[in-house]
Image (spheres, rainbow, N blue to C red):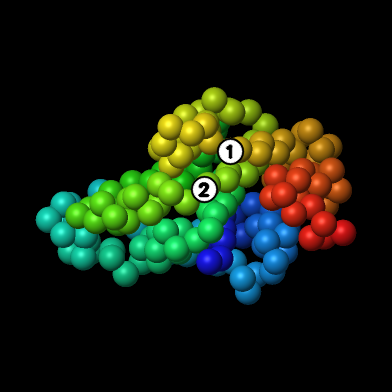
């Protein structure tokens, strides 16, 4: 089993992307973890259809976009890692699109939902505010267990979020490595 890493940022080359690279290296390299980067994906949100998935998930007009592949990767993974940026005190829209599309993935397949719920999930959030909103949004994925979240504030490390240089801070990188439990991975 491998780990699954998802960056929900729509911005290529920003903090979430650099966090993903640090995380992937700590998880033993990109070749052993499946990585999904929303900035490089084309995903359709719910609501632009006739709810065909309520009859059968395979009838979803967007069945072939990356959402199903991502959920399949998670249900077959050891741990799922979600890297989520803060936009306006809440997780970004890509995270909510992904949430909405879960109803189609699990429709008629309770065994997939059971497997998804059994996979440990860890969240890394790039945020200067909004902890409560993120914790509430993540509970959907962790059931009765409190979400395991690392909040990284660019301000805390003397950085400006929009610059995308958070992982240039040794302290921020160390925080990510401690969160993985594999601190030795980057030396």
Side (left or right) of 18 relative to 87: right
Query: Of the residues under marks 2 and 1, which one precedes in the sequence?
Result: 2
Contact? badges 2 and 1 (CB < 8 Å): yes
Q: In the structure shown, which secondary structural element does the residue marked by tag 2 occupy?
A: loop
Q: Which mark is residue 49?
A: none
User: Residue shown at 40%/63% (left/top)?
Assistant: 72
Q: CA distance from mark 2 to mark 1?
A: 9 Å
User: Residue shown at 56%/65% (left/top)?
Assistant: 2
Q: Residues within 10 Å of mark 2 (few under 14, many from 20)?
A: some
Q: Which residue is mark 2?
A: 120
Percent position of residue 79, x then y? 55, 54
Percent position of residue 49, x then y? 20, 55
**Above or below 141: residue 98:** below
**Above or below 174: residue 153:** above
Side (left or right) of 64 relative to 87: left
Q: Is residue 119 visible?
A: yes
Q: Which residue is mark 1?
A: 148
Q: In the structure shown, which secondary structural element does the residue marked by tag 1 occupy?
A: strand
Image quarter (top left, top right, bottom left or bottom right) of the C terminus: bottom right
Q: Residue furthest top?
A: 132
């Amino acid at each position: 089993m491998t780990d699954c890493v998802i960056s929900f940022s729509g911005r290529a080359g920003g903090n979430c992307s650099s966090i993903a690279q640090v995380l992937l290296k700590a998880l033993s390299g990109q070749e052993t973890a499946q990585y999904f980067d929303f900035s490089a994906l084309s995903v359709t949100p719910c609501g632009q259809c006739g709810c065909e998935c309520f009859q059968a998930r395979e009838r979803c007009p967007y069945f072939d976009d990356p959402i199903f592949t991502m959920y399949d990767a998670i249900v077959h993974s050891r741990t799922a890692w979600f890297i989520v940026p803060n936009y306006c005190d809440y997780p970004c829209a890509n995270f909510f699109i992904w949430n909405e599309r879960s109803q189609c993935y699990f429709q008629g397949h309770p065994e997939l939902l059971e497997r998804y719920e059994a996979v440990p999930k860890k969240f890394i959030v790039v945020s200067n505010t909004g902890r409560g909103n993120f914790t509430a949004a993540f509970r959907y994925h962790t059931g009765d267990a409190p979400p395991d979240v690392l909040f990284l504030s660019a301000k805390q490390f003397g950085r400006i979020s929009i610059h995308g240089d958070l992982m240039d801070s040794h302290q921020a990188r160390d925080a990510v490595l401690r969160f993985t439990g594999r601190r030795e991975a980057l030396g």
